[in-house]
Structures are given as structure tokens and as C-alpha cells.
Image: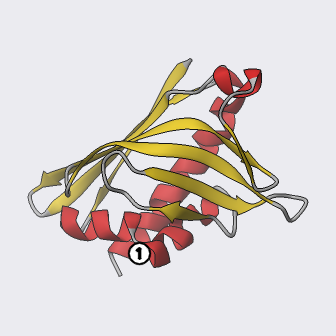
């Protein structure tokens, strides 16, 4: 599994960046870069299950089954991806899922004199690497614009 890292400096305090990134209303806006209609079901507390969902090409719900591995308020969030949702059904046991189950997606919020450096690092399968290399920079630019409004 490969590792990707993205970073951006946002002219806003890390509390605002954190809230804008993780609150439902604004999460739905910046994650449109991945899939229009993206949302989550669950919460961001350590140990909790969270589903990252969106409409598939066929109109059925699809996405990821995950859990929050760590959450240090305004500092760091670690998401462990456990499986996927296909047509509204969770799959955490198939061979397809076992190839990448346990992959982490981490968000670090670092104060830079009142601005925030947001660092995203994640484990990724080779087949999805190019796609996420294109999507994450767009998503981070959208998040930056929301935070700096």
C-alpha cells in the first residue's frame, strides 16, 4: 500500500478549520470534490463507527465503513477504513475489502502564527492513487475557501 500526503495553509485558526472540515453542513460542501452528494453518518469521537457515503452512479448508496481510531480536539483525527458500502450494504469481510482494510486517513491541524497548516496523509492502493492525487488538492482548496470566507 502506498502513502499519499497533502498539505495546505489556511488563513484561519485551527479551531475554525477543524469545525469547517468536520461539521455536517460544511463537510458536504468541501467533499463534493470527491463525489457530489457526499455525507457521513456517525460521529467523530474516538472509537466510533462512521460511514462515509454518497450516491453511486446507479443512484444507490455507496461509500466506506470506517471507525475513528483517534481524535485529539483541534489537533488530529485518524480514520481507519474497515470496508465499503455497496448498494446500502456494508462489506467488511470480502477478499476485495481485505486487500486494503485497516488503511488510515489522518488529518493534522498545526498552528502557524494564527493560520493553520492542514496535513492529510493516507494509505492508498495503487489503483486509486492517481484519482486521489487529483481529488484531494481540489477538496483542500474548497475547504480553504470555506474557512477564509
The total of numbered circles placed on residues is 1
Quadrant where the image shows the C terminus: bottom left
Instruction: Measuring from the top left, give residue 35's x and y in whole percent.
Output: 69, 60
The quadrant where residue 124 appears:
top right
Residue situated in front as seen by the camera: 24 or 145: 24
Examine the rendered structure and indicate whether residue 56 appears above or below residue 2. below
Q: Is residue 61 left or right of residue 145?
A: right
Examine the rendered structure and indicate whether residue 93 appears above or below residue 147. above
Which residue is drawn at the image coordinates 36% and 70% (left, top)?
Answer: 20
Which residue is drawn at the image coordinates 48% and 78% (left, top)?
Answer: 25
Examine the rendered structure and indicate whether residue 60 appears above or below residue 110. below
Query: For numbered disc 1, what is the local secondary structure?
Result: helix
The quadrant where residue 23 appears:
bottom left
Examine the rendered structure and indicate whether residue 111 appears above or below residue 91. below
Quadrant where the image shows the N terminus: top right
Instruction: Measuring from the top left, give residue 114's x and y in whole percent.
Output: 12, 64
Instruction: Measuring from the top left, give residue 113's x and y in whole percent.
Output: 8, 58
Residue furthest out toward the bottom: 149
Residue situated in front as seen by the camera: 73 or 30: 73
Residue furthest out toward the right: 58
Instruction: Measuring from the top left, give residue 54's x and y in whole percent.
Output: 69, 62
Q: Is residue 122 left or right of residue 45?
A: right
Q: Is residue 59 left or right of residue 32?
A: right
The quadrant where residue 74 appears:
bottom left
Residue furthest out toward the left: 113
State how the image is colored. secondary structure
Q: Which residue is under mark 1?
A: 146
How many other residues sit within 10 Å of disc 1, few (<14), some (14-19) or many (≥20)?
some
Amino acid at each position: 500500500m502506498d502513502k499519499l500526503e497533502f498539505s495546505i495553509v489556511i488563513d484561519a485558526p485551527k479551531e475554525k478549520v477543524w469545525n469547517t472540515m468536520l461539521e455536517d453542513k460544511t463537510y458536504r460542501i468541501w467533499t463534493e470534490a470527491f463525489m457530489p452528494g457526499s455525507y457521513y453518518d456517525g460521529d467523530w469521537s474516538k472509537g466510533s463507527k462512521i460511514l462515509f457515503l454518497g450516491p453511486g452512479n446507479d443512484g444507490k448508496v455507496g461509500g466506506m465503513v470506517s471507525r475513528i481510531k483517534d481524535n485529539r480536539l483541534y489537533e488530529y483525527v485518524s480514520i481507519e477504513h474497515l470496508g465499503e458500502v455497496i448498494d446500502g450494504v456494508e462489506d467488511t469481510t470480502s477478499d476485495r475489502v481485505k486487500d486494503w482494510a485497516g488503511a488510515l486517513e489522518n488529518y493534522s491541524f498545526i498552528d502557524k502564527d494564527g493560520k493553520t497548516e492542514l496535513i492529510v496523509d493516507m494509505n492508498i492502493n495503487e489503483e486509486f492513487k492517481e484519482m486521489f492525487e487529483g481529488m484531494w488538492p481540489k477538496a483542500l482548496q474548497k475547504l480553504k475557501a470555506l474557512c477564509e470566507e
